[in-house]
Image (tube, rainbow, N blue to C red):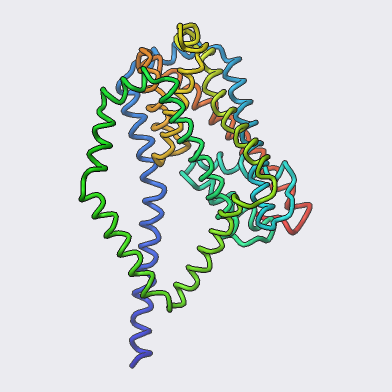
Amino acid sequence: MDQEQTSHTAPDATPRRRLSSMAGKALRYIVPACVSIGLIIWLFHKVDIHEVVHIIRHGCDFRWIAMMMTLTMLSHIIRGIRWGIQLRGVGIPRIPVVAESVSIFGAYALNLLFPYLGEAWRCVYISRREKAPLSTVVGTDLGDRASDAIVVVALFVLTIILAHPIMDRFFIHYGVDRDIRHWVEDPRIWLGIGLAGGIIWTTLYFSKGHRYFQSFKENVMKIWNGFKVLFHMEGIGMYVLLTLGIWTCYYLETYCCFYAFPFTRQLIEQPGSAYGLIPGLVVFVFGSFSIAVPSNGGLGPWNLAVMFALSLYGIPETEGTAYSITVWGCQALMLVALGIFSAIYIMSERRKSPKTAT
């Protein structure tokens, strides 16, 4: 009787699992694509696309755009070297700088196709290449992103201090401080957080004897070991220095493009703008926060965030669109080129050594 029930249940369970897997993939891939497409359609609906093209063709100094693309490549090389410090901290042998860079080149290129696909790929690439536990490598990736989140928050605080007239106008006009106070003072929010925490704790407590829980716990511990290496690894000073290098490159990518257009060049000449460094910081920070919205390589959310930041300085939507589309488009071209280089490198590496795989 039990065997009979099993034989009837298994075929039914398999289609359900497949359907659930397909639904999960649809949510991961289709929703972000729809976000990007929807925001871009809405963006172009609001501006004169012919005027945008005219500004790009006749008003853009592409020498500065080329410098931005070079800085993009440099930032990814530095990021790869920085990640190598974390990987060595969890016992993975030193990896050639080219391989470290390729892991980042390929990741950012794949993120243009699907959000976070590149993050998964670079972990798998290093795990297979070095025969290391995937969960440990994932932990180092989480640590990598956590350190970036700290930098973004620090830059936001710095922006509030240095660009306080603009930021005060933004907070007051949009009622940001009022909304924050409302959320903090609403007891329902804290009740919901406490209830969610209680449910999670109860579920974990009563599941701790189950073999699936043990497997889950082991993977979580491996991820945690990969993450906590940030706090005790050798070369922490170099890690901090490389972090500063990464984010300096990111900032300069935004700032040097100010020289590419006449309307952003005016921000450099404004009194009190510190040669455009402060407006550049505002635009950069708003663009950095847009990565919280899942999209294909930031397309859509990043453009709108940058346009909004430029509008705080009086730059109209059409000019802001020209700036954001040019910067994003040329950066995407650079990432595609770096992705092609990564594919060629990995294929040649695979032919040389059977150890290497993707």
Left or right? Give the position of 149 relative to 122: left
Q: Position of residue 94 (x, y in %)?
A: 74, 50
Is residue 58 visible to us here? no
In depth, the one of 281 and 310 nearer the eye is 281
In which image quadrant can residue 294 be found? top left
Is residue 176 visible to us here? yes
User: Is residue 262 shown above or below 138?
Assistant: above
Q: Position of residue 208 (x, y in %)?
A: 42, 75
The residue located at (66%, 51%) in the rendering is 233
User: Is residue 68 shown above or below 222?
Assistant: above
The residue located at (37%, 35%) in the rendering is 37
The residue located at (41%, 47%) in the rendering is 29
In which image quadrant can residue 102 be found? top right
In which image quadrant can residue 83 be found? top right
Left or right? Give the position of 319 relative to 253: left
Left or right? Give the position of 184 relative to 223: left
In depth, the one of 231 and 101 nearer the eye is 231
The extreme right residue here reads 352
Q: How many marks?
A: 0
Q: Position of residue 48 (x, y in %)?
A: 34, 16
The residue located at (38%, 56%) in the rendering is 24
